[in-house]
Amino acid sequence: MMTDVTNNNLMLFSGRGNPELCEEIASHLGIVPGKVDLSTFANGEIYCKYDESVRGANVFILQSHTPPINDRIFEQMIMIDAAKRASASEITAICPFYGYSRQDRKASGREPITARLVADMMEAAGADRVIAIDLHTGQIQGFFNKPVDHLTAVPILAEYLSKKVSGEVTVVSPDAGGGKLARKFAKCFAAYGQASELAFVDKRRPEGKHNAVVAETVVGNIEGRSCILVDDMIDTAGTITAATQLLKDKGAKEVFIAATHGVFSAPAAQRLSDSGAKEVVVTNSLPLPQDGQDFSGVKVVSIGKLFADAVKQVYEKGSVSELFTVSNFG
């Protein structure tokens, strides 16, 4: 079903991070993505030129911060700056995956808060608003002095898995810090007629190792139950697969894995395949990596309609929160 917009002053452009998602959003809106020339010079500098006028337009610039992540972030900044200098009336940055979101605080002395730096750069480039989904921590919204519409894919993931899981269900956070996300998932899951309990995995991360984790114990009732591990992202899959193995060792009947962002840095695909999880579900906030990994066991659900609805509401000055707050589910 289309989410047609009311007139032709809306223009949607994509960087090179996730053009397929942009095409899908445009299709739902009943528009065609705008034309922009993006290329990279021999020395690595990025060139941008809009191939049509954006003067007076409400411009939406979509970019998933995919590898090479620094190039994709800066490419979006350049696109924002070009639109501003071409007299766009309002510029909204759409970030289906917001880079550096895990660097949202100083974990120890002499570290940066890079998620804040990205926000500062985006505002300096000329963004008037940001649309993001399932940021690693909600506090990132406060890094901006501009409006941020923070969407969630949890209802989409919960709806899909409600049709796959039966019997007694426990929604599990892979760490104690993800309890809020697990509760949100359980609430949406209940809205689709599936009752569930909550549990979390107690883990520790070896000092100085950013992609290593040791899962130690499970707090909650999981024995003989179908477990759904819920996280905002899967990177190398070390955390989520360690949690999967622990759940199976503790007597879980079956384990499903759900996350909004499938970063999937190697060796994620192999770890997920070896984990014994019954199904792995992510969204298309990021395209699957084209690096030779086998993702045949990964299910991708779309957030295209969700973003199209958000773009429509922003463009028509409607309420985004009314559409996407989890309180509407149950």
Image (tube, rainbow, N blue to C red):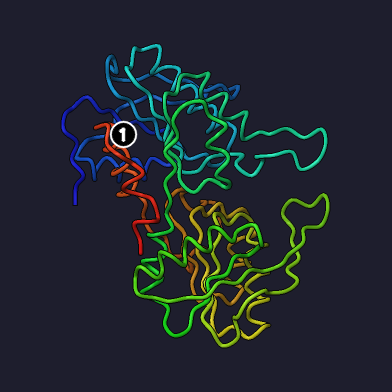
In the displayed structure, 146 sits above or below 207; it is: above
Q: Tag 1, which secondary structure?
A: helix
In the visual, does 13 lie left or right of 97? left
Q: Residue at x 73, y 32 (%)?
A: 112
Residue 56 percent location from the top left of the image? 27, 15
Q: Nearer the viewer, residue 129 or 12?
A: 129
* Residue 25 percent across, percent down from the top left: 30, 43
> Image quadrant of residue 50?
top left
* Amino acid type, callout 1: Val
In the rendered image, the quadrant that contains the C terminus is bottom left
Residue annotated with mark 1: 314
User: What residue lies at 61% left-to-right and 53% top-to-bottom?
Assistant: 265
Please indicate whether residue 187 sits to the left or right of residue 68 in the image. left
Vertical relation: 207 (above or below) 217: above
In the image, what residue occupies the spot 31% across and 48% down?
Answer: 323
| Figure quadrant of residue 272 | bottom right
Answer above or below: position of 291 versus 62: below
Q: Residues within 10 Å of mark 1 (few under 14, many from 20)?
A: some
